[in-house]
Amino acid sequence: MSLEQPDYTVAYKDGDVEYRQYDSYLVAETVIENVEHYNDAGNEGFRRLFRYITGGNRNQSKIAMTAPVQQDPVSEKIAMTTPVQQTNAAGGWRVAFMLPKKYSMETAPAPTDPRVRIREVPGRMMAVLRYSGRWTESNFTKRKAALRAALSESDIETVGEMQSAVYNPPYTPPFLRRNEVMIEVMESPQARTSLAAEYLALGTGS
């Protein structure tokens, strides 16, 4: 992949699940409201964000495409004047592009579409399951269930909603595509094991 991607380190791997520590990064994001279907929301979100990076901003700047395209369900309405307005939405999806690392909150071109906003995603630990194939809601649902089951088996506490991440353009053959499902977690199994070992060592006086 030649496209810029978020920086992360793999903290631990448990079978097919990677625990990644991500650095903070900026995204341009939009919420597709009142749409239940994954693919319909993804297509509309991509169109809005693509217009933004191809000149639909106050600087009329062209912004380099990055990877992945991220998508997750939301139950809140995003306000353009405040960070988050806690208003229920009747179903919806958040679609986001990472902005290139050269931009900051102060220098990122302001969107002309009020439905697009710039937001900083803080550094966090994510549990990730990678797969190939088509970008369909059924594939997303299947992998989401598999990741949930793996995390439940390891007794890992999650934060927020499950996200999808798509790395390749539509013309890429499905068997060569890199897709992921991911969710924020409080810790990795390794971190919990290390903490337990420290407590054990303190208890035995070693």
Image (cartoon, helix red, strand yellow):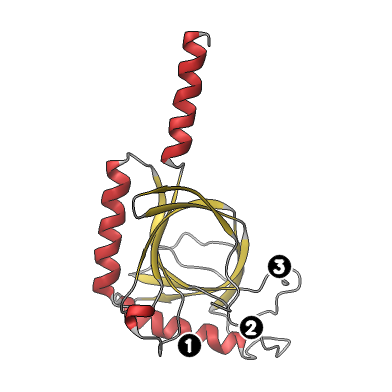
Identify the residue position indicated by label 2 in the image.
Answer: 64
Left or right, 112 with reference to 189: right
SS assignment at label 2 = loop
Residue matched to label 1: 47
Q: Earlier in the sequence, mark 2 or mark 1?
A: 1
Q: Eyeballing the image, is 81 above or below 35?
A: above
Picture residue at 68% right of the left edge, 69% below the top: 101
- Residue type at numbered disc 1: Arg
Residue at the spot 54% in from the left edge and 61% down from the top edge: 84
Q: Look at the image and tell me whether residue 66 can be seen.
A: yes
User: Is residue 82 or residue 113 the one in the foreground?
Assistant: 113
Q: What residue occupies the far right of the structure in this picture?
A: 107
CA neighbours of label 1 inside 10 A, class few (<14), some (14 to 19), many (20+): few
Residue 122 picture location, percent across and down? 59, 55
Which quadrant of the view contains residue 94? bottom left
Task: Decide which of 135, 93 is in the foreground and name it.
Answer: 135
Marks 2/1: CA–CA distance: 15 Å
